[in-house]
Amino acid sequence: MKARTLLAVPLTSDQPPLLEQAHAARAGGADLIELRVDCIANPDAVLAFLSGPRPLPVIVTVRSVNEGGQWQGSEPDRLVLIQCLADCAPDYLDLEFQTWTALPARDKLRGPLIHSVHGWLQALWDSPAEIVKVATAADDARDEWRMLDWLRRHASQRKIAAMCFGPAGLATRVLAPKFGGHFTFGALTPDQASAPGQPTVHELRNCYRWQQIGPATRIFGVLGWPVSHSRSPAVHNAAMTHARIDGVYIPMPVRADEAALSELLEFLTARAELDVAGLSVTIPHKEHALRWLSARGMEVSERALRAGAVNTLIRMDGDTWAGDNTDVLGIQSALAAVGVSRGCTALVLGAGGMARAAVLGLTELGCRVTVCSRTARRAEALAGAMGCRWKPWTDRAAVDADLVVNATSVGMQPESNASPLPASALHPGTTVVDAVYTPPMTQLLRNAQRAGCRIVPGTEVFLAQAAAQFQCWHGCSAPLDVMRTALEA
Ligand code: NAP
């Protein structure tokens, strides 16, 4: 059986002292430390550390600027320093394949070697390195999945560490234990990350439950552009941990064009061994996902068809997926929780994806809906498609409604002082739902509370749609309180 994946913590500065940092890494659960000598820029401190007792096995790396490192000296000086550090018997010496071939005394190097390939890939099987490390930049999730698939196919043959840089490389770092990676890197703090996109040890352990990930772990995630701000990983990972489900949920940025989403979905569909079992879909890919499923004759729920958008993909047997829309359910459950009556009058602000889901959810509840949107033709088109009324944006304050739903992005960070409706249009007894959930308490909701309205924050809508996704993927009800705590943390 293959050994478990090791956690390596890079040390990139000599402050606090290296020994102190090494002890902190061990206390945090690290198996190895990597001395990034190019970043530390104090070879004497490194040599002193290597000559004393070491709390953990050590990788020594002197990365050149060309290879993504910070070595400021000349190339001959770098080679001399590498030779000198090798004489201190580090547990591993991380050498780019090209550097190793350039070292005059390479046959006399002591200790196991890690050969790195940064930025290009070639067969390294004939090199004497104990570990082959492959690191490339990822443009989007398509690159990280190609890397993970390569790791999956080769991990039984050699010790491999395979990872992608950047925000689109997170899956390669988190999923190393799933696909047999020999180690992955986690920084002690965000400032100490030695490569772009490197997670912290805290994130790996607490958000992604890294220690529990293994070959049987099923994978879930969110596809969108951008997705790094998404709270869904925190919420779904906490819920799966609570429900003792062997799964992990990861943000996967996919470039905004439809072809990018299609290419990734084709790749994952053709490789059931990658175990991607469920995906959330967010801006701008909800309509793309619906078209992708429809073009392949795959199942799309009636609700998603009427909403014109898919926000949930569920892996069925073999190479098929089904699509659903839980945004509609999110609005409906959030309204049910505050006891909104069937057949009320409702004003929906906006005419985008969320507005469409809100209009659909409200008309299903028998509400009489008026849509107001900044772009009149979008309001008119939405009202025409859903069989409701529309009014120009300038008339929104005069619409008489028991319920107001803000489905625009007005009020979202960083413009959190903006409101889509003047405070004078809010009256006691009205229910105000804001789809915006960053921040949870928007200017619109503050004004509504002051005016004596009942308020429903976007976080409640978000949680209700996430709970519905959880049910779709796992077939059991979601631990809503656990999800709420994770969202608020
Ligand atoms: P979308 O499809 O891009 O639609 C955005 C809507 O906002 C459009 O109608 C747009 O009008 C309008 N808008 C943007 N800026 C405006 C401004 N300054 N004044 C007036 N109208 C403006 O986005 P979406 O997916 O519907 O998302 C809308 C909001 O809902 C976002 O804040 C999103 O985060 C939130 N959301 C929340 C949840 C949840 O679970 N709580 C789920 C999904 C979305 P134009 O057509 O004129 O540009």
Image (spheres, rainbow, N blue to C red):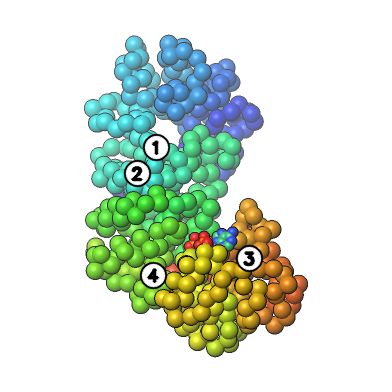
How crowded is the residue under tag 4: few (<14 C-alpha within 10 Å), some, or many (20+)?
A: some
Q: Is residue 56 left or right of residue 265?
A: right
Q: Would you call the spot at circle 1 few (<14 residues within 10 Å), some (14-19), or many (20 or more)?
A: some
Q: CA distance from mark 4 to mark 3?
A: 24 Å
Residue at left 29%, top 25%?
128
SS class, disc 1: strand
Image quarter where the C terminus lies is bottom right
User: Closer to the camera: disc 4 or disc 1?
Assistant: 4
Residue at the disc numbered 4: 308
**Could you say which is closer to the camera, residue 381 or residue 79?**
381
Q: Label 2 amino acid? A: Asp
Query: First in sequence: mark 4 or mark 2?
Result: 2
Q: Earlier in the sequence, mark 4 or mark 1?
A: 1
Numbered badge on residue 420: 3
- Residue 29, horizontal then vertical, whole percent: 52, 44
Separation of residues labelled 3 and 2 (CA atoms)? 39 Å
Question: Left or right of 440: which side holds 121?
Answer: left
Marks 4, 2: nearer the viewer: 4
